[in-house]
Image: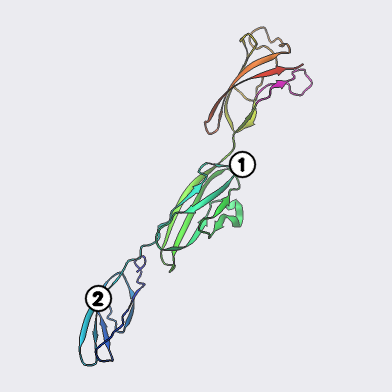
């Protein structure tokens, strides 16, 4: 019997005595015959009578077939938009036979669905996606669903040059960091004696090669200068960086 539906049956075979045999089963409604069907889980008693009135009573148990329980895992657990391919692994238990996946990625078209047990899916963009798995037993009667969500993250990148040319030619006039999905940024620039000559909390406001706040914005000479950067991603991962930059005029 599956999921409370009466799908069980009993087939009995008689031997001995004098044929023909008659059968009487204590079912509701009463059934007769060597084979009875439409049974729910439980114990069923029957009586066989031969042509001379000899009887034999017996019982059979129709077991409960546990319904499938849907479950799955996916790898990697941290998904980057640069490598958005995800491997799904079926962890369902019970009497399942078929799988119906929906990856929650409507933009991927027909690739959004799969009937494989352990499929792969490549996500189309960053965002939060909820995946559903429906497992069905071999009789198509019992079903179970599991839903889990994953996040396809944007990739944090950061780059800072080692030289710039603040000479008013319109190219490489400012020294700052560059990248994607930057949340917080703090830049400090020092001269060779360790004096702070520039500071910025905005990645879009870079150093123009002048001394800030001290000697009234004087241009620094061609030299190598020390910088320190504290930067964090939109996922709150923090980086503390130091380096040198050459001013070329």
Residue extending farthest front: 16
Residue at the image point whose x is 65% and y is 22% from the top: 205
From the image, which quarter does the N terminus lie in?
bottom left
Q: Is residue 100 left or right of residue 60?
A: right
Residue at the image point whose x is 60% and y is 57% from the top: 110
Label 2 element class: strand
159 over 14 or under it: above or below: above
> What residue range appears in magenta?
160-176
Q: Position of residue 134 (x, y in %)?
A: 46, 58
Q: Is residue 248 left or right of residue 178?
A: right
* Near-viewer residue (126 or 114): 114
Q: Is residue 169 magenta?
A: yes
126 over 243 or under it: above or below: below
Instruction: From the image, tell me which residue sits under label 1.
Output: 82
- Badge 1: few (under 14), some or many (20 or more) residues near its Cα, within 10 Å? few
Indicate the quadrant where residue 168 lies.
top right
Q: Position of residue 51 (x, y in %)?
A: 24, 92
Instruction: From the image, tell me which residue sits under label 2.
Output: 59
Indicate the quadrant where residue 186 lies.
top right
Residue at the image point whose x is 73% and y is 11% from the top: 221
Q: Position of residue 142 (x, y in %)?
A: 41, 64
């Amino acid at each position: 019997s599956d999921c409370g539906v009466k799908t069980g049956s009993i087939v009995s075979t008689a031997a001995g005595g004098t044929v023909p045999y008659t059968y009487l089963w204590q079912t509701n409604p009463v059934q007769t015959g060597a084979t009875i069907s439409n049974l729910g889980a439980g114990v069923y008693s029957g009586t066989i009578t031969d042509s001379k009135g000899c009887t034999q009573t017996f019982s059979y148990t129709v077991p409960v077939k546990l319904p499938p329980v849907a479950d799955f895992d996916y790898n990697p657990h941290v998904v980057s938009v640069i490598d958005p391919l995800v491997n799904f692994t079926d962890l369902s238990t019970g009497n399942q036979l078929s799988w119906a996946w929906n990856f929650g990625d409507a933009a991927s078209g027909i690739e959004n669905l799969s009937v494989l047990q352990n499929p792969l899916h490549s996500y189309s963009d960053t965002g939060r996606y909820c995946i559903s798995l429906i497992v069905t037993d071999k009789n198509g009667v019992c079903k179970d669903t599991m839903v889990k969500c994953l996040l396809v993250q944007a990739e944090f990148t950061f780059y800072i040059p080692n030289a710039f040319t603040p000479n008013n030619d319109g190219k490489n006039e400012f020294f700052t960091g560059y990248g994607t999905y930057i949340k917080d940024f703090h830049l400090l620039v020092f001269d060779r004696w360790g004096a702070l000559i520039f500071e910025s909390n905005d990645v879009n406001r870079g150093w123009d090669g002048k001394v800030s706040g001290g000697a009234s914005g004087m241009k620094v000479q061609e030299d190598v200068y020390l910088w320190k950067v504290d930067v964090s991603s939109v996922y709150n991962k923090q980086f503390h960086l130091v380096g040198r930059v050459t001013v070329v005029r």
